[in-house]
Image: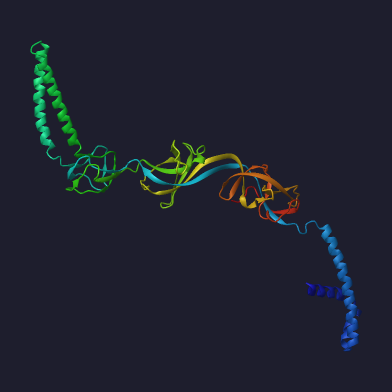
Amino acid sequence: MKYILTILTLSILLTSCGDGKKNTVEKALESNDLETIRKKRAELVDQQQVLHDKIMLLDEKISVLDTTKNVPLVTAFKATPEEFNHVLELQGNVTTKDLMVITPEYNGILTNVYVKEGQWVSKGQTLAKIDDGGLSQQLAQQQIQKDLAQTTFERQKRLWDQKIGSEIQFLQAKSNYEGQVEAVNQIQQQISKTIVKAPFSGKIDAIITEQGSVVVAVQTQLMQIVNLDNMYIETEVPERHLNTITVGKNVEVIFPILGKTINTKVRQISNVINPSNRTFKAEIAIPNKERDIKPNLTARLKINDYTNKEAILIPQSIISENAEGEQYVYVVKDKNDRNQGTATRVIIKTGRTQGDLIEVLEGIENSAELIQEGARSVKDGQTVEILILDNQQND
């Protein structure tokens, strides 16, 4: 810098000097006399110092008069009320009440399996048959005895109605008939347990036990049936959200594996708090027309737990904190026609956050211009120039 100033000063000196002075310098150089050259140089150095001092005085005056010098450039945005929907992010698993591993109610040999894997079945449809171990023959014999007891009872009843015969004969015939009816019903119930039926409409997802195998009541797994129409997600919600996560709340469900997002609602809230982890269960209904959502699939949930129709949202990055722990931002006030104004520190009170944005509850007025880029470097009361002014902050 000094080198440039020296050249500039010499240029001014040479320009200000007439041809006579130039000739004097040239003559001093042509003289080849050391003393003459040194003398001429000393004269020019003295003139350079005088000019330098004058330039410094001019610069000092300019710095006083030029208000645009050293004014920091900043970007700003206008605080505009907008709808703010805060969400609680949770994780959950897909499940369905229509998912069951079917087990037999009777011990015996699995004589017939009437369905295949992947087959759609209706509620009540027969799926398999277990050997009844001679119960059918017992039923036939018992039916004959029941028919005989019924005939005897009907005859005794006609006679008794005509006041013929003894009452004890009538009551014995009646009791015998009722006993035979009960015996038939019991055998029929036992036989019904040998027939495996679909508990609900759905698809046979797996055949677990093959035809011809010996099965044990309640223990042997025969097949798995599932219906993907009535799917839902079950998630555990911390108890502090008991008043904000309620039935009917909007939910955004994201399935990362499927690359799919659906919008639905909370359909049920548990009435019991789990004492071990202080959570309650929430069920979120899942429409599944395409049947690509499977049980036990993991999902990310965004449940709307708070809404403000007129919220002021600002980037968290522009907020600073003072020694008292108060949060503050800088707003631009008294802006002139050159986009210059005064940076003013404003204490704020904040609410909920969502991503990089935070809700301002107190301290910021509608349409206030908040400093964004440069907010960390300005000082209270400093003059700033707004380079870019957005109507809304950049997310």
- Choose top left, top right, bottom left or bottom right for residue 39: bottom right
> Is residue 320 among the parts visible in the rendering?
yes
Please give the name of the residue rendered at 15% of the width and 29% of the height, measured from the top-left corner: 183
Front-lying residue, 165 or 112: 165
From the viewer's perspective, tell me whether residue 217 is left or right of residue 33: left
- Choose top left, top right, bottom left or bottom right for residue 48: bottom right
Image label count: 0
Q: Quadrant of the N terminus?
A: bottom right
Front-lying residue, 354 or 260: 354
Please give the name of the residue rendered at 68% of the width and 49% of the height, measured from the top-left corner: 329
* Residue, far bottom: 32
x and y percent of residue 303 in the render?
A: 49, 43
x and y percent of residue 349 in the render?
A: 65, 43
Please give the name of the residue rendered at 73% of the width and 57% of the height, measured from the top-left corner: 72
From the viewer's perspective, tell me whether residue 330 is left or right of residue 106: right
Front-lying residue, 346 or 144: 144
